[in-house]
Amino acid sequence: MTAGISQESHSALIDRAIQENRLAHALLIYGQNLKGIEAFANELASKLVDSQLSEGGLGWHPDVFALRPSKKSRIISVDDTRELIRNIQHSPQKAERKVAFIHEADRFNPSAANAFLKTLEEPPLNTNILLLTTRPHSLMATIRSRCQLFRLPAGANEIEDARTLEWLDDYRSLLSDMLAKQPSGKSAVPRYIMGIYGLIERFRNIIEAITKETWKEQSKQLPEDLDDDERIAMESRISISLRHEFLSAIEQATERFTRDTLAKRPEAASKLVKSIKELERASGLLRLNLRPETALEAFLLKALRIWSA
């Protein structure tokens, strides 16, 4: 079953499913924003184990378990998967139910996925398994088919960080200069290049700073027995998620700039289409573990050709 749920109704839908005792034992929760997915899953888990999120976080609850990618490779291993399977076989200690989070479920390696599939086929009693991902089609089809699917709405990225907002303003100003070919003459291209590499350096600094700030806050909610490999993978995941959110914000900024200039510069529409294709290519390069600065550099240099042509 697939449910495309509006922002206003998805919590109510879950509440009703819990009350009517028809919530599936395994839910695949997916969308475009990993932070939104995790927030929704935490809200659901707190209801299932009847615990308030403010009580130090669900990571401390004896009936809540988590499986995450580990090490720098950020893969969910078969050993970690088997350990989770053993843990959820026991009866609940405090609540009436147990909850298992599978963070970034698309990161299962083949052996781990096959081991986990057996648990989905014969689920433990009084257990809900929440698989979280932004890439549902990267999971084995047999895993997807055994889960109730919940698609969360994309929504618009609400950027609040002042450093990021300033970066996006400067990016739009650069697009405006390139489209208007200002300044004109031989000095134009060197100025654009300097602007591009300034944006790249600031991008790197912003991502590093926000990653450290986010990790410092999130690490307070983690169980003490979390091993170093999982900590490394979680901090890496924060950085990766921020990069993709940043690219999404660049896409939205490009779209807004195009709308604002379309009346006077109708050629901006075709330039937008080309820019989005290049952003998608940059996002794909990030998934292949290319350095984020290199992916952004490739996009911005392509944007220079697109918008100044």
Image (cartoon, helix red, strand yellow):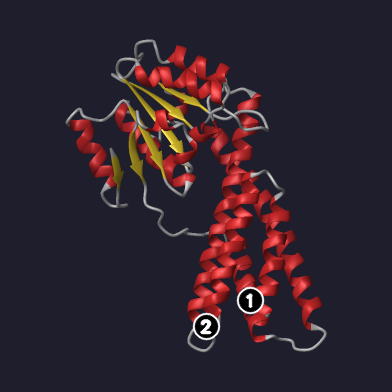
Q: Position of residue 87 (x, y in %)?
A: 45, 14
Task: First in sequence, mark 1 or 2: give its number.
Answer: 1
Residue 174, quarter of the rendered image: bottom right
Q: Please give left or right for residue 24 compared with residue 202 in the image.
A: left
Residue 108 or residue 41, whichever sits in front: 108
Q: How many numbered marks, from 0 up? A: 2
Residue at x-position 65% and y-position 86% = 180
Crowding near the residue tagged with mark 2, few <14, some 14–19, many ≥20 C-alpha atoms within 10 Å: some
Disc sitting over residue 175 in the figure: 1
Q: Residues within 10 Å of mark 1 (few under 14, many from 20)?
A: many
Image check: 139 left or right of 224?
A: left
Establish if 135 lies above or below 183.
above
The quarter of the rendered structure image containing the C terminus is bottom right
Residue at 48% over, 21% down: 114
Task: Say which of 252 and 299 sits in front.
Answer: 299
* Residue 179 sits above or below residue 299 on the image: below
Residue type highlighted by circle 2: Thr
**Three-letter amino acid code at the position of disc 1:** Leu
- Asked whether 290 or 195 is in front, the reply is 290
Q: Quadrant of the N terminus?
A: top left
